[in-house]
Amino acid sequence: MDLSMLNPKQLEAVNVLEGPLLILAGAGSGKTRTLTCRIANLLEHGIPAWSILALTFTNKAAREMQTRIEQLVGQDKAADMWIGTFHSVCVRILRRDIEKLGYSRSFTIFDEDDQLRVLKDVLKKFDIDEKYLPPKEVRREISSAKSRLLNADEWFAESDKSRRSQQLHDVFFAYDKTLAEYSALDFDDLLNKTIQLFLDHPPVLEYYQRKFRHCLVDEYQDTNYVQYEFVRLLTDVSHNLCVVGDDDQSIYGWRGADIRNILEFEKDFENVRVIKLEQNYRSTANILDAANQVIAHNRGRKEKALWTDGPAGEKIQLYTAGDERDEGAWICERVRQLNRSGVPYSEMAVLYRSHPQSRVIEEMFVRAGLPYRVFGGPRFYERKEIKDALAYLRVIVNPADTVSLKRIINTPKRSIGDATVARLEDEAARQEIPLFSVLPDPPESLSARARRCVSGFAELMFRLIAAQDTMNLTDYVAFILKETALDQQLDNEDAEFYQARLDNLRELVSAVHEYETKSEDHSLNGYLENVSLITDLDRQEDAPQYVTLMTLHAAKGLEYDAVFLPGMEENVFPNYRAVMEDNRLEEERRLAYVGITRAKKYLFLSCARQRTFYNQVNYNAPSVFLSEIPERLINDTGKSARQHFGDDPVRRSAARPQRPLDFGVPGTGQKRDPLTIPGVSKGFVPSAARALSGSALMNMYKPGDRVMHRKFGEGTVEKVWGKGGEARISISFTAYGTKEFSLSIAPIFKIDT
Ligand code: ATP
Ligand code: MG
C-alpha cells in the first residue's frame, strides 16, 4: 500500500492493528480514507479478508467504500469482506438463521406503506379512531421504541400509563403479532431481530464473534442504540472495533441516533486509542472557515480545530431572491456559468433542507435544459403500479404475506369486494391459517359468484407459482405482468397517467433485468430483498454527467466542487420546528455544517424574500446561520442583501398581501429608477454586474445581452424597440418565459456572464 497518501495522524490510525480505536475528526479530514486504508493494512498484516466487517449508512456509501477497497486490495479480496449497511448485513445474518426465531427464511421486508396498512387494519379491529391515534404517529412511536430495543410491554412499562398509552400498547402489540403472522419484518426489526437472535441463540453470536475479527464503522456519530448494541456484541470477544465519526455531523437524532455513542466511546470500551485528524483536505480555507464559525455556536460538542493549508479560494456567494422561482433560476445560471468555466455537472450539488423544496428547483432545471437528478422524492418503488406488481412477487415468495395479498386480491379488479375479503379473513382466523390458504377452497357462506372469483384468483396464483422455475427472472416478471393483466387495468385510467404508468411497469422489467445481469443471486427473493434495501440515495443509478439534487441528510460523506444551499431562511433552514427548540437548533446547525463542508471550491447560499410553501406565501427572515458566517467570507451580494433584509417593510408585517414587491411590470404605473430599487443594489452580482440607467443608456441593450430583473431574475434580451419613453424590451427568463417591459421603468441591470 502506498503510505505516502496519508498524513502522520492518518498513518498512526492505519497502523493501530488491534483494540478499540476511535477516529474522531471534522469533515473532510480523511476519515473514510483512513478507514479504507486501515482495512488494506490489516490484510497486509495477514488478517484474512473474510474476517472483516465494514459498516456504513447508505448503500451508496457502502458501494463507494467497496470500490475504494477494491482499488487498494483487488476485487477478489474485497468480495470476501462483508461491506454494507447495518440493514443489509442484518438481512444477510437473518436469512441464514431467522428460522430459529420462528420466521420463514423468505421473510418479507415491510416498508412504511406496508406498515401503515397493517396499522390501519389493527386500529379498525380495536375500533380506535384514526384521528385519535393517527397511523403515522403510531408508526413513529413504534419505531422510536424499537430503536431503543423495546417491545410493546417494555415500552408500556416506561410510559405514563395513560389511557392513550394503553391503547398504543395494544396496537403496538397487535402490530408485531400481525407482522409475525405474515412472516414480515419492518426496518427496525431487521436490527432488533438480529440482536434477539444473538441473545437467544448464543452459538449464532459466537459464530459471528469468531468470524468477524475486525469490525469497522464509518459515520459512527449517527448510530442509534440498537446499532451500538449490534457492534458491541459482535466485538465483545475480539475488542477490535474501529469507529470513525464526527460529533459535529450527527444529524439523525430525530430518528433515534444517539450522539452519546461517539461522545462516550471511551467510557464504553476499555483501553481505547483516540486519534484526532485536524487537517482538512476537501474545502478551500474560506469554506472551511465558514463551517468552523457556524459550528462554533453549538455548545454540546468536542472542541476541534480544523485547518487547511490549501488556498483561500473564492468567497461564498449569497443571493437574495425575490421568490423561490427566482432562486431556482439563479442557481441554474450559476450552474451554467460554472460549467462553462470547466466544472463538470457531476461536481455540482443542490442540497436542500426538505424534499418539497426540490419541486421548483427541478422545474427550473427543466426549463433551463440542464441535466440533473433528484435523489429521493417520488420514488420509483413507491408508485402504485410498481407496488402492485411487487406485491404479486412478494406473495409468490411468501404466501403468508397477507398485506401484499390483500393489496392484489382485487387488483386488477376481479369482483372480490371488501365484504368477501372480510369473510375470507374470518375464515382464516377461525381455522388459524393464513388468508392465502383459504383461497383454493372458499367458504360455502360466500355467494357462488364470489366463490368463483376467489377460486379464479387462486388458480391464477398457483399458475404463476408453478411457472417460477421454468424461465429466467426477467421473463418471469414480464410473464406475471401479462398473466395478471396489470397493464390492461391501466387502460381504464386517465390517458395522461396511463402512458407514464405503463412506462413504469416496463421500467420494472428493465430493473429486474439489470439486477439479474449484475448480481449473483438470481432468485426472486434476492431481487425483492434488493428492492427493499434500496434507500433514497440509491434510487438513481450513477450516470456521470448531471447535477445532483438531494436533501442535506442524504449528502453525508459526499463531496462536490460546487455546492448550493438554497432556502437559507428561518423556518426553512433551520426548519420551523427547530426554531422553537434549542437542542433541535443544534442539530440543524450540524446539518448546516454538513452542508457547507460538502463543498470543495464553491459555495452558494440563497434565500428568498417570499416563498410559497405548502400553498402558503411566507415571508421568512434570513437564516440565523447566515449571520454566523463572518461577512469577510461572503461576497458583497450577500452583504447588501442582508442589509436590505433588515429594513424590508415586507418583513415587518407578515400580513401584507401577496406580491408586494411587484415592480416594474407594465401597466402598474410604478416608476422607479433602476438604480435605487430596493433589494437590488449595484453590487447585486458584484464584480460582474454593471448597472445601466437613463435613456442615454437604453440603446445599449441588444438581443443576446444577459440582464438581471428585480422580480424575474436573470434573463436574456430578445428584442428592443421603440424610442424614448415608449421604448420597450422583451426578455426571456429561465424561470418565467418571455416577458415584455417598458424600458424606462423596467428594474433591470445588464450583467456580464
Ligand atoms: P466526511 O466527514 O465528510 O465524511 P471524511 O473525513 O470521511 O469526510 P474523506 O472523504 O475521507 O473525509 O476525505 C476528504 C477528501 O480529502 C477526499 O477527497 C480525500 O481523497 C482527501 N484526502 C484525505 N486524506 C488526504 C491526504 N492525506 N492527502 C490528500 N488528500 C486527502
Ligand atoms: Mg467520510
Image (cartoon, helix red, strand yellow):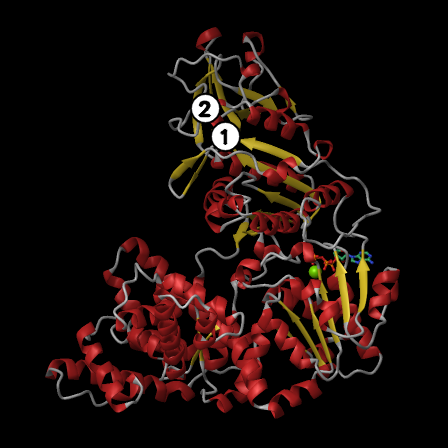
Left or right: residue 23 versus residue 728 is: right
Which element type, helix, strand or loop, lies under badge 1? Answer: loop
Quarter of the image with the N terminus is bottom right
- Residue that numbered label 1 is attached to: 322
Whole-percent x and y of residue 214?
74, 79
Ligand 1 is within 8 Å of the C-beta of the residue at disc 1 = no
| Residue shown at the point (53%, 69%) measured from the top left | 147
Marks 1 and 2 sit apart, C-alpha to C-alpha, by: 8 Å
| Residue 414 placement: quadrant | bottom left
Say which mark, if any, is on residue 661.
2
Nearest the camera: 176 or 615? 176
Which element type, helix, strand or loop, lies under badge 2? Answer: loop
Left or right: residue 723 versus residue 120 is: right
Say which mark, if any, is on residue 157.
none
Label 1: how many Cα within 10 Å (few below 14, some 14–19, many 20+): many
Whole-percent x and y of residue 216?
71, 72
Q: In this view, does 8 lie above or below 572?
A: below
